[in-house]
Amino acid sequence: MTKRRDPNPEFDLFIPLVNDLPLKDQRETMERPFFSLQKRKRVKPIEYRSPDGETWIKIEAIPAYGMATIWDADILIWAASTLNRMKEQGVNDLPRTLKITSYDLLRAIKRDTSGRSYQELQAALHRLQTTSISTSIRAPKRRTKAGFNWLDKWTLEADPETDQPRGMTITLSDWVYEGIVNERSLLTMHADYFLLSGGLERALYRIARKHAGSQKGGWTCRVEVLREKTGSDSKPKEFNRMLRKIVEANQLPDYTMEWAQTTNNSPAILFRMRGEAEALALSAELETERDRRERVEADRRRTQEVDDLMDRLARGGGR
């Protein structure tokens, strides 16, 4: 554990080291399409019903903010991981409101700490609070349903002199909180999940983690079912094209992907657990790719700063 100091004593907290906090996610949300897979604003609802008709979900967004994305869900994964750590440490009254600094949260979910990242963090909080979910999960046989948002409320505090972000709080909705603290409701995720840049890749990993687990022989799923489980709004032809690229790249943590066929010759994907050596090699590749993206982004920012400076000098010379 490490202690982050903050001028505001309310946020003088013990924060788990990033590498010391095993990732946890709610198994109920991992196999179903609860989040948008695209970074552009989505307002089209997601509707899903299981083959037996018992389990259904409907996700709706308001136009002002759009639907919560699978990247926004990283905040919920951090919350689940943090509460799970507290439970393991014997904390009896697990809080529904969690406090952290914006910097620590961005680092925990493996984001950079540029000004744009802080803006994106605030946008994510808006989407998590305003996205509406209706579902029969947890009570399908009673034909009841639950309605909720991911977050009940949140706060972001800025330094009064520099306007830089400092502390923040997030209050989980009852449905989310109960799912996290319930026994056997969480699954451990690979730490490199946060490094996956594609929304469909992230959804496929979550589905594979839930269904394939560590079973021998892996787990096979029809492509049509995968499309339904991810909630992709792409046409089948486009979805198949993206899926082929992901299978070819074969970069999911924990699992390999390969084409297969079901007994009735429907196209399918076979997910298998990776060997230890292969997993280590993949982790190194993902870290290298992340470093490359950060260098490219840093070069872009430096170029923009130089261009802005040259523009200001040119305008000044013109006077």
Image: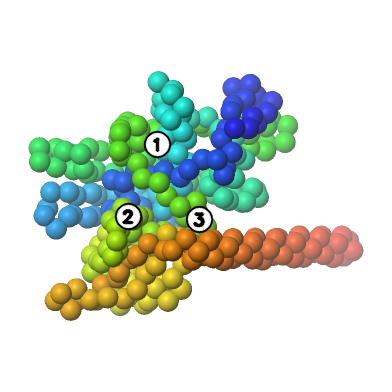
Residue assigned mark 1: 151
Which residue is at a point 53% across and 61% down the rendered structure image?
280
Instruction: Give how far apart the Cα atoms at labels 3 and 1 are.
Output: 25 Å
Q: Is residue 21 above or below residue 244?
A: above
Of the numbered discs in the image, which one, if any, rests on residue 240? none
Residue that badge 2 annotates? 213
Q: Residue at x 86, y 62 (%)?
A: 313
Name the image quarter holding the C terminus.
bottom right
Say if 194 sits above or below 285 in the image: above
* Foreground: disc 3 or disc 1: 3
Real-space Cα separation, disc 1 to disc 2, in angstroms = 28 Å
Front-most of 208 and 307?
A: 208
Disc 2, SS: loop
Q: Dot 3, crowdedness within 10 Å: few (<14), some or many (≥20)?
A: some
The residue type indicated by label 2 comes to Gly
Q: Is residue 211 left or right of residue 11?
A: left
At a point 42% along the width and 50% down the height, the residue shown is 189
Q: Is residue 157 left or right of residue 135?
A: right
Is disc 1 in contact with disc 2, using a CB cutoff of under 8 Å?
no
What amino acid does circle 1 point to?
A: Leu
- Residue 144: horizontal and vertical position, in percent? 14, 37
Q: Quarter of the image holding residue 268? A: bottom left
Q: Earlier in the sequence, mark 2 or mark 3?
A: 3
Q: Indicate which disc, 1 or 2, sits on the residue closer to the N terminus.
A: 1
Q: Assign a secondary structure to mark 3.
A: helix
Residue 146 found in image quarter? top left
x 35%, y 41%: residue: 186
Q: Picture coordinates of residue 98 (x, y %)?
A: 48, 30
Look at mark 3 in the image and give the residue it sits on: 192
**In this orientation, does residue 4 appear?**
yes
**In front of the other: 212 or 241:** 212
Residue 282 is situated, as x and y percent measured from the top left of the image, at: 52, 65
